[in-house]
Image: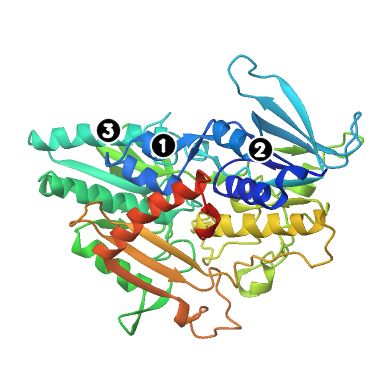
Amino acid sequence: MATLLIIGAGVAGHTAALHAKRELGSRHEVVVVSPNTRWNWIPSNIWVGVGKMTKEQVTFPLEPLYRRKGITFHQALATAIHPDGGNGHDRGYVVARSTRPGSEGQEIAIEYDYLINCTGPKLNFAATEGLGPDGHSLSVCTAGHATEAAKQLTAAIGRLKAGENLRFVIGVGHGTCTCEGAAFEYIFNVDHVLRENGVRDRAEIFYLTNEAQLGDFGVGGLTFTQQGYQTTSKLWTESFYRERNIHPILGAHCKKIEPGRITYEQLDGTIHQLHFDFAMLLPPFRGADLKAYDREGNDISDKMFNPAGFMKVDANYAAGSYENWSASDWPQTYQSPLYDNVFAAGIAFAPPHPISQPRTSPNGTLIAPAPPRTGMPSGMIAKAVVLTIVDRIRGKSKPARHAIMTKMGAACVASAGMGLFSGSAASMTMHPIVPDWQAYPDTGRDLRGTSGEIGLAGHWMKHILHFLFLYKAKGHPFWWLIPE
């Protein structure tokens, strides 16, 4: 019997666990370690954050599902990886600290034959003074955060109906944030809800972003086909903001959030202040607070992880400056270069460099989106890693499965307002996710697989996908037929 240990139960970790158990059955053990008791379909937190859904509609308990599937579940926070074993363990093992009520803080050691790090992001609100729910801004990164955002939005709408004029600031709270797409979704859902309530004329809305131009989305922007014609995500998105009278502030790095006031720096080095009545600003991400030790107990964390805490895999981390970047820099198998039985998937793996061109202000401040690798890419990478491990457990001599972001396509449906007949969404596809300028010298991507449309049909698709992916995540019959 082989033991596959998965740390983290987000999109990547949960996907990996379900596929692994389906492939390996009862002959091998699949173990999941996560501090969270509930799984969250994070894309729908946007709708929770504007009061269109509840927390219960986007989450479900993990333990009953894992029990039904025969997956061993530890409600605990992984703190250290010992890939060489030692301290009485012949195999590699992970140390985790229990978060289960009644045993909080107790440490356990879990041995493995194969390990997948799917720990996802640490929400690094501390990177900007005053950022986040414990500071002076809101978030939709978790279902709980989104619930509080909806409560504050309802209060703001009440003030608008009472005759006040308010300023809303929505975007990112640091110069190196990722997930600009989530900020895009939230700002247009807020706009939509304000219009539904008849108070949009009293609201001034600003979009605060680290993108150098609208439509960058952390992937360097897109050139795509729309109704048979070529356009760019820059023109497409600029039109979207202009039509809805939303004011973008580009190339911005938040330096401090105070009650009702944001201090930010722009790419030209100038410092500004922006007053607000309602602010939802996404945080930058860090890797989980994991350490790694060799058999003798020596700390090897700097060898296994990059300075931001993401695990190094089979990528080229010596690419250097933007001019030297290549599609070949990106990982293929997501296997640790140090241990052939250790992998990372989803946000947990360290990208070789950003996708967007990095930019620095005259003050030396880096203001550039970090590379997104959430949602569809996370699921596809997790499945590929699981199939590699399954092949090895079964003794097959096949090479490792690949899920290369410079060859992988992805679809994104970004909500712009919820409503059966009044809703809208931006539906985008890109192929590949990371541009390959050698294969596609004109735009970096294959125009046949890169497109964009905005409209009501996109909202219907987004709503249907909400139910499909929750059905899949709950492991209902034939769940595996739904693509990642």
231 vs 10, left or right, is left
**Residue ID at (66%, 44%):** 309
Label 1 environment density (alpha carbons within 10 Å; few <14, some 14–19, many ≥20):
many
The residue shown at (43%, 62%) is 217
Image coordinates of residue 268 in percent, x first then y, are 42, 60
Q: Which residue is mark 1?
A: 143
Location of mark 2 (residue): 70
Place residue 350 in its image quadrant.
bottom right
What amino acid is at disc 2? Answer: Gly
Viewer can see residue 208: no
| Label placed on residue 417 | none
Q: Is residue 150 above or below residue 408?
A: above
Secondary structure under the numbered disc 2 in the rendered image? loop
* Spatial separation of the CA atoms under disc 3 and disc 1: 14 Å
Q: Which amino acid type corresponds to the residue marked 1 in the rendered image?
A: Ala
Residue 223, percent from left and from top: 42, 77
In this figure, which residue is indicated by the disc labeled 3? 152
* Closer to us: 432 or 391: 391
Q: Which residue is at 57% across, 44% downward?
A: 121
Q: Is residue 284 above or below residue 229?
A: above
Query: Judging from the image, what secondary structure is the residue with disc 1 in?
Result: helix
Q: Is residue 126 above or below residue 447?
A: above
Judged from the image, the secondary structure of the residue bearing numbered disc 3 is helix
Amino acid on which the number 3 mark rests in the picture:
Gln
- Sooner in the amino-acid sequence: mark 1 or mark 2: 2
Q: CA distance from mark 1 to mark 2?
A: 27 Å
Q: Residues within 10 Å of mark 3 (few under 14, many from 20)?
A: some
Q: Earlier in the sequence, mark 2 or mark 3?
A: 2
